[in-house]
Structure formats: structure tokens, C-alpha cells
Amino acid sequence: MYRLQKIDELLLPSHQYLDPQDECFFFMTYTRLSLGFTPENDLILNFKKAMDRKGKSEWKHKGNAIQEVSNLFIQGTPAINPPGVIFVPIPPSRMKGDPMYDDRIVQVMNNFCSARPNAELREIIYVRQNMPPTHENKLSPGEILPYLEVDKALCVNQKPNVVLVDDVVTDGAHFKACQGLLRQRFPNSRITGLFIARTLH
Amino acid sequence: MLQFGNTTPVQPLKEIVAYEALWANKKTTWKSLSDLFARHPDSLPSDFVSGDQVHAIEDEVKKFVFGMNFRTGLLISGTFDFPMQLNDAKERIVLLYYTGILEYLKTRCVAIVGTRTPSSEGLAVAAEVATKLAMDDFTVVSGLASGIDTQAHKSTIAAGGRTIAVLGTPLNKVYPKENNELQNKIANEHLLISQVPFYRYSKQDYRINKNFFLERNKTMSALTEATLIVEAGETSGSLTQAAAALFQKRKLFIWDTCFKNKKISWPQNFAEKGAIRVSSYEELKGYLNHA
């Protein structure tokens, strides 16, 4: 079982949009993910493998990575007491239905929630229009907001803890945009972030 | 805190201050820390220090940690980032400081070490092996000392390879001074690692601090799959690394010319315990890729 780490005062300077009050947790650190010399069996690279690789022999690595990440969450997070926690995936940049839409985080959280009593998955936030690819233009939280929509029907039956989940946190822009939306809908809940990895440029 | 069951997430700065506070006690040694965490394997440094102990050094520690021209990173036992290889070390390492490209630790790493006062032949061997290891996509690890270490780092960088320096000083100190530029380059473009506590080091005489160099050699061996000793005298820190490598079941290579020096007996002693005598890079590479 691995311990989670918190993005604290030491690590905060690497994540420009996060504030000292934000509570974000992660399992692993990637300092130069983009350099690509990490081994082919690298968990995050396989996990993020693009949807257009489907059908190729490498695709099985993605399935394995989804399972491995699920296990990491299940084993790294032992028990959730009543009244429970709502887990909200930070949506990927593509709309549902787009060929490149990737539901890897939803798959992981489905696995997680079926293994963990009192954990509940709610896809509260979704993308109403495809976002531009991040490698072309890094968006700020304010620039991300117009692409996001809240499913109000899923905001009933609130709980004290809401956790936003994503694969990686880099500058924290997606987290901040989603946190802002949830704060309006869940004014009395504590909203935290849970990530597989934090990445640095 | 986001509390899942009993597993408290690590707050990196809090653990750094706690680790430094443990070391602020003059009785603390690598052995005593190792024993402490062996008795309490699921603990963090912060489990063993009082608020007063933290308070006494906190500001000073933060000055060290935030006072460098690069960002301090933390590797702590129990987290996914912590290199599993370290568990093979005789004395348990609970925490390492780093700056740079952490992914290097996931690549194949080979250490090149040796004397601070090498012969020209020794330097040539270090340069050749480092260059060829880099070209074969190995990461070259050394200790940033004068002589063989410096040559290994520089040749690796010149060959466009990856290098890791495992320091015997805290991250904020450079020894020897003339390696300042090299240390900065490794910090900014490669990977710099140290287990040495900032605070304790700053309060001790340099003669006592020398002991940290030997601990560094054990850690360097644990982080790598093999160590090559190019050239070393009877009292070299490289021999600490050699003994650690054999204990940790790492490959230990000794360059052929060491055996021809009749003034020293360590090559033969280590060869009898399992070290491999090599006289060319190709031979060394053969052992790395097989058996």
C-alpha cells in the first residue's frame, strides 16, 4: 500500500494555479514526463494512451494500466466512513461521443467505488464543447470554464466531502475551474483533489 | 486532511522538518534511524518529534530548503516515488532529497567511482566507460567527488547521456568547490540526490561531516544495478561502496589495472567475494546484459 502525498508549501510553487488553501493529493511524481525516456511499461504513459491507438497491439497496456491505477486507488485508500464521499471526475478535454473521448478516469472510479463502501461516483461536470489540445495552448481556469457544464440533477443529496479526480495535476487549471463550479453547487462541502500523479514541466 | 482510514497522507515539508529535527539530536546516526523505522515500519519522521523540537529548527530548515536556486524535492519511504532499490541497503534509508529529473531512477543505472587522485590512465578509463554507457542508454551515477567521479559525470554529459550525482553533502553544499558549476548543471538538467540533513551538517565540524560521504556510497550502490571501481587506494570510500554492492547483491566490477597494483590488496579480496574483474567496456556490458 502506498501513502498519498499532499501538495503542500514545498510543492506548491510548481503548480501555478493552486492556492495554499487547496487540498490536493497524489500518489506519484513525474518531473519530465514529456521527455519520453521512461520505460515502455510506464504506468502513466500507458494510462493516458490516446484512443486512436485502439486495436493496436499496444492497446492492452492501457487496459492493464487502468486496472493498475484502480488497484492503486483501492489499496492506497483503505476505508471511507459514512456518510461517504462523492468522487467527481475532472472531465477530459473531449465531449462524450467524440472518437477521442477517453473515459479512463470514469473506469477507474467505477472500479474503485464498487470496491469501496460509501464511495460514490458522480459525473457532475462534463464538457459541452471540445477543448483545444493542451499542447497547442495552455488554458487558464477562466478559459476552461466556458467549456464546462454542471449536471444539476446530480447535485442533490450532498455530502460533506467531494473529491475531484484526475490522472495528473500540472498547473492545476482544470482542478481550479472544476473546484469553482462545485463550490457554487456544494457550498457546505469540502472540495479536495485526488490525482494519480503530479507532473512538472 | 483527506483521511482515508488510517493512512495519513504525507505532507512533504512537515516530514522534512521532522527528519531534520530527528538529526538535530546529536545521538542520531544512520543506524539509530534505521533501527527506529525498522521497529515502526509504517511510521513517518513526524511521528517521532515533538512540537518543541520542530519549532526549534523549523525556520532554519525552511531557509535551507527554499534558499537554493533550484527546487528541493522529497522522496520518502512508503510512497510510490520512493525507490524500491533502497530497501536492499543494510541500513534503512527513510528520506532522500532530490532536485532534477526523477524519472532517471526508473532507467538502468550504473555507478562509476574511484579515487580523487587518479592516474591519467584511470581518468581515460572513466571517460571511456562513461561515454559508452551513455551511448548504450545507461544512466551513469557517481558522487561528484574530484577525480574519477567528476570525469564520469563530465564524460556522460559530453556524450549526451543521463547522469545522477549522489552527494555526500546536503543539496545546498558543493564539495569540492570547483565542482560548483557541474553540480548546478546536474541539478538543472539531470538529477541530484542527497540523504544528508541540512541542519545537522551545518552545525558540525567538517571532519565529522566526512562520515556522510561513506553513507552516500552505500546509497549510490543501492540505487544502481552495478558499480565499477576504476582505480582506488586502500582507504578509498569506493571500498565502502564495493562492500555495500556485494551485500546488496549488486554487480561489482573492478577494472583490471587495479589488480596489477601490488601496493593494494582490496581488488583480490573483493574478487574472492564475488567482484568481477573487467578489462574492457565490452566485457562489462556483456555482464550487464547477461547473467
Image (spheres, coloured by chain):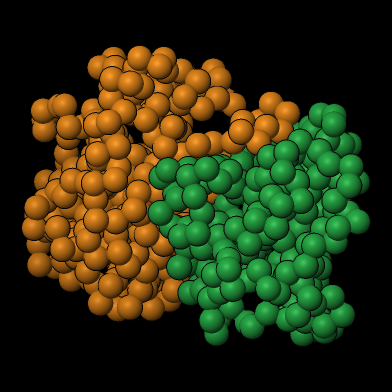
Chain colours: A green, B orange
Which one is in front, B220 or A188?
Answer: A188
Residue B34: quadrant of the picture: top left
**Relative to A43, residue A18 above or below:** above
Please tell me in which quadrant of the rendered image residue B230 appears.
bottom left
Q: Residue at x 14, y 58 (%)?
A: B179
> In the visual, does B157 lie left or right of A19?
left
Percent of width and height locating residue A38: 54, 68
Is any atom of residue A155 visible in this view? yes
Mark yes or no: residue B245 visible: no
Which quadrant, please, contains the N terminus of chain B? Answer: top right
Give the vertical position of B131 relative to B214 (above or below).
below
Left or right, residue A10 beside residue B24: right
**Quarter of the image containing the C terminus of chain B?**
bottom right
A127 vs B228, nearest the viewer: A127
Q: Using the image as rendered, state which of residue B73 and residue B163 is in the foreground.
A: B73
Residue at horizontal 52%, vertical 43%? A21
Horizontal and vertical percent position of residue A70: 78, 52
Between B251 and B203, the residue placed more toward the observer is B203
Q: Quadrant of residue B140?
A: bottom left
Q: Is residue A65 left or right of residue B281?
A: right
Relative to A134, say whether A2 is above or below: above
User: Residue B154: percent from the left, percent from the top?
Assistant: 22, 69
User: Which residue is painted at 42% across and 43% down in the image?
Assistant: A9
Q: Position of residue B82 (x, y in %)?
A: 51, 45
Q: How many marks?
A: 0
- The residue positioned 65% from the left and 36% from the top of the image is B2
Side of B137 relative to A75 (left or right): left
